[in-house]
Amino acid sequence: MAVSGQVNTDSLSLVSAISKDQLQLGKLQNQLEQKTNNKQDASEKAQNTASKNSTAADKLSEQPNNKKLAKKAKKEARAAKKDSKSARIESGNLDQLNKDIHELEKRISNNQVKLDKYIKNGTTKRTASDSLRTQL
């Protein structure tokens, strides 16, 4: 009887953990599309500002004493640096989200296997105890 109670408690805690993890997984999967779009937008913006920076640097190299071009090139370089950092951050955020999703899926799968074992063993033990009761 104590074994059956322990199995029931363990299986309930597994069901609770699986349910909690599935809810969390759903939340993370809902963020996936937005994070992917953020990464793509940041990457495109970084490429555009890098191109503008390159153009400004080329113009400055043609007229190295032009202060107006130097100021513009410096401004474009600063923007390119900022946007490339933003793109790296967004890429890291997406990578972390994918990692978290993978880990949750793995944990849910492992807990499901454990739960299946409890259900299988619990059914077998109940059947054995039921047959003992009928014999007495």
Image: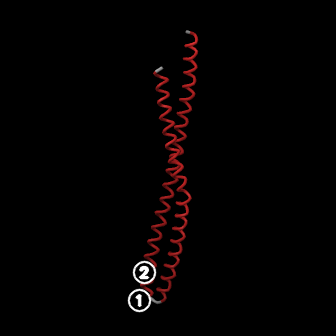
- Residue that appears at 50% across and 44% down: 21
Residue found at the far top of this picture? 136
Q: Where is residue 79 in the image (x, y as percent from the top left)?
A: 45, 75
Q: Where is residue 54 in the image (x, y as percent from the top left)?
A: 50, 79
Q: Are marks 1 and 2 in contact (CB under 8 Å)?
A: no
Q: Where is residue 43 in the image (x, y as percent from the top left)?
A: 53, 68
Q: How is the image coloured?
A: secondary structure
Distance from the alpha carbon under mark 1 to that under mark 2: 10 Å
What residue is disc 1 on? Answer: 67
Amino acid bearing label 1: Lys
Amino acid bearing label 2: Lys
- Residue that appears at 56% across and 58% down: 33
Q: Residues within 10 Å of mark 2 (few under 14, many from 20)?
A: some
Taking depth in this image into account, of 125 and 53 the one nearest to the observer is 125
Occupied quadrant, residue 131 = top right
Position above or below: 96 against 68:
above
Position above or below: 71 against 116:
below
- Residue that appears at 55% across and 9% down: 136
Position above or below: 93 against 48:
above
For label 1, the SS is helix
Q: How crowded is mark 1: few (under 14 residues within 10 Å), some or many (20 or more)?
A: few
How many dots with numbers? 2
Q: Position of residue 36 (x, y in %)?
A: 55, 61
What residue is disc 2 on? Answer: 74
Sequence-wise, the earlier of marks 1 and 2 is 1
For label 2, the SS is helix
Residue 103 is tagged as: none
- Residue that appears at 41% across and 89% down: 67
